[in-house]
Image: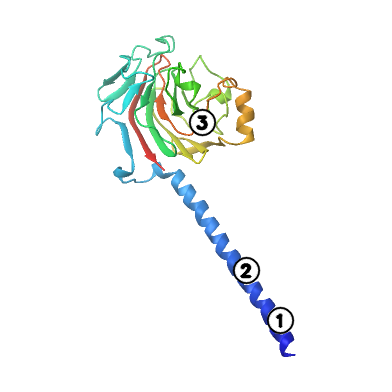
Amino acid sequence: MTQKFLGKNHTFLSLLIALTVLSFWSCNQQTASESNNEASLSWNKPIIADDWILLYDQDKNPTLDGWTGFNSVEISPKWEIIDNLLTVSIQGDDVDKNTGFGQSIVSKDRYKNFELEVHYRMSKGANSGIMYHVKQGTEYRDDYETGPEYQLLDNALARSESLPHRQVAALYDMFAPSSSPYHPAGEWNIAGIRLQDCFVEHYLNGVQVLSYDLNSEEFEQKRLESKWFDDADWAKTGEGHISIQDHGDKVEFRLIRIKPL
């Protein structure tokens, strides 16, 4: 009797321990998930300034000291600081006034995991882009040969792009955003990119509109169907520069900041 009674207690005790462990694990999983959501939306909340590196700030850092031209120490004169706003292709300020594709600027430093926030204003019909994990070298003519692109576009009036996976906040020529909460030409927008261990999220004006995994089979299949099918190093560097494109249209920037993760 005693031995059988102890056996039941042992079974009950084992079940209790298992339930306790499961409960602890579940709580930790939920906490981690909630923590990830908090981090993903951090640029919508008060942030200690020291958490961010100001690549450009119209008030605190209105200089191009943190940038170079792509594959060059010099920066193209098409990039100017006007009224404390970083401005590219100032003459390309209307739908039919494109000034021609020009040299991108790239951050001097390289980044692997990060949150990036870009406050920008498009002219009518303007096209531009933000690239990350960009690699420089004589074997590359342009930043888009290695860097995936967060598309910047005036969806309403742009003549150059109309396909969903080439609209604003898309991963250019790869994935379309789930929505487009953009403000029209002449108004300010906030682009956000969060990259953590190959998992990427795109934000537009505080709304998450896209997510993808750089290491997934889906990503590779999309790449093979895209413009980048024969660019062996595209989205493969794992670390690199931030790049802002000159597509020949006027675009202004008042804040570009990054937080390494």
Q: Residue at x 71, y 86 (%)?
A: 5
N-term-proximal mark, 2 vs 3: 2
Q: Quick one: 182 or 41, which is closer to the camera?
A: 41
Task: Say which residue label 1 marks.
Answer: 8
- Residue 19 disc label: 2
Per the image, label 1 sits on a secondary structure element best described as helix
The residue nearer to you, when weighing 196 against 184, is: 196
Asked whether, in this view, residue 20 is left or right of residue 103, the answer is: right
Q: Amino acid at mark 1?
A: Lys
Up-down relation of residue 34 to residue 222 (above or below): below
Q: Can residue 187 be seen by looking at this rendering?
A: no
First of labels 3, 1 by sequence position = 1
Locate the C terminus by quadrant.
Answer: top left
How many marks the image carries: the answer is 3
Residue 96: x and y, percent? 43, 9
Q: Amino acid at mark 2?
A: Leu
Which residue is disc 3 drawn over?
180
**Callout 2 touching callout 3 (CB < 8 Å):** no
Label 2 element class: helix
Please tell me how crowded label 1 is: few (under 14), some (14-19), or many (20+) other residues with Cα within 10 Å: few
* Mark 2: few/some/many CA within 10 Å (<14, 14-19, 20+): few
Q: Residue at x 42, y 23 (%)?
A: 136
Q: Element under label 3?
A: loop
The residue under the point 33% across, 22% down is: 68
Alpha carbon separation for disc pair 2 and 1: 17 Å
* Residue in the foreground of this view, choosing between 71 and 211: 71
Residue 25 appears at what percent x and percent y? 57, 61
Residue 41 appearing in the image:
yes
